Image (spheres, helix red, strand yellow):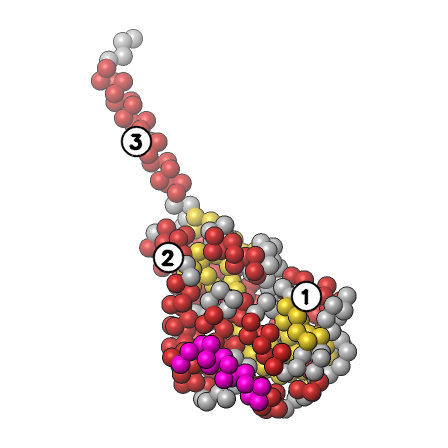
Amino acid sequence: MTITRRQILKGATALAAGTAIRPAVAARKTVIKIGLDLEPSHPTVANLNAAATKIKDATSGEVTLQVFPSSQLGDDTHMLSNLRSGAMQMMAVGDNILGTLVPSAAIDNIGFAFKTPEMAWKALDGAVGAMVRADIEKAGLHPMHLIWDEGFRQITSSTKQINAPADLHGFKIRVPPSPISLSIFQSLGASATTINAAELYTALQTRVVDGQENPLGNIETMKLDQVQKYCSLTNHMWVGYWLLVNGQFWASLPDDHKKVIADTLDAQALEQRKANQALDTSLEETLKKQGMNFAKPDTTAFQKALSQFGFYKTWKEKFGTPLWTALESVTGPLN
């Protein structure tokens, strides 16, 4: 059988076309790994998994969101570094930790600033959040629009109940690697040590520190009640969780995929807020049954101690007038 030159050229063209098509189809398969430090039983993980299912369905399997809880991809500091370098695509991180890279992100961690979670959400969904998101973008990261809720932080101890600022004098307490967390407890006279969440249980178990501070949801899901006897409901700081994507990776995604991811995660943020607050409301009784003793101190004494130490004046200067004014438009005067 004779093969003509025309047939050879036709076959080569078809082969080239097939080669060009296959990589294009493969390129639309996107896997996004998101790391966080919370335990699998935490509402945040459940809502991220729900978002993963919805994103996969909405993109006909073209985008897969893989959720890695319990610091499987490293502690917060390690993950944030990898996110910036592009070694990770996405992470969920507390604003207090993010504040080490983007200082304005810690604005909502000001001690005793918010009276309710709804007040915090109003600030972060409004002008305060807009300023913080702009600063996050400048750091090469893309934030989802709505912040997720980690809740108010409470103080726990293995040695004594914390009822007044004097009880913190010299008290060995773990705080996350966050400048503002360290500042609050140093201002209150505590001996504060920064330790990542991944090492927290061991640090408490071995008495490297005698206490720590976290939302009740974290205390329960991390089983800290096994190594802590007392809990003081101080509500001293509200913490939110930003969902961040590496900026270059985000820019590389098709616009339709960006919209599905952003819309789905923001919708789940609203569900996560409700779920986290429901869990928080139920946990005092749960933890009491598990042997933890609770106290509800007068928090105005703690706030007064911070003010006398110059905490609010110092952080107002650090954050600058525009951001501080935006915060006070929601909280009222902080001094």
Q: What element does badge 3 sit on? A: helix
* Numbered badge on residue 200: 1
Q: Nearer the viewer, residue 4 or 151?
A: 151
On residue 258, which mark appears?
Answer: 2
Q: In the drawing, does residue 110 fall left or right of residue 293?
A: left
Determine whether, in the image, residue 69 is placed left or right of residue 191. Answer: left
The magenta-colored residue range is: 307-321
Q: x, y percentage for residue 237?
A: 56, 79
| Image depth: mark 1 or mark 3 in front | 1
Nearest the eye: 3 or 169 = 169
Badge 2: residue crowd in 10 Å (few <14, some 14–19, many ≥20): some
Whole-Å distance between the Cαs marked 1 and 3? 56 Å
Say if the magenta span includes residue 245.
Answer: no
Relative depth, front residue between 170 and 245 = 170
Q: Position of residue 264 (x, y in %)?
A: 42, 62
The type of residue carrying mark 1 is: Leu
Q: What secondary structure is the magenta-colored segment mainly?
A: helix
Task: First in sequence, mark 2 or 1: give its number.
Answer: 1
Q: CA distance from mark 2 to mark 3?
A: 28 Å
Amino acid tagged 2: Lys
- Looking at the rendered structure, the secondary structure element under dot 2 is helix
Disc 3 target residue: 17
Secondary structure type for disc 1: helix
Quadrant into which the N terminus falls? top left
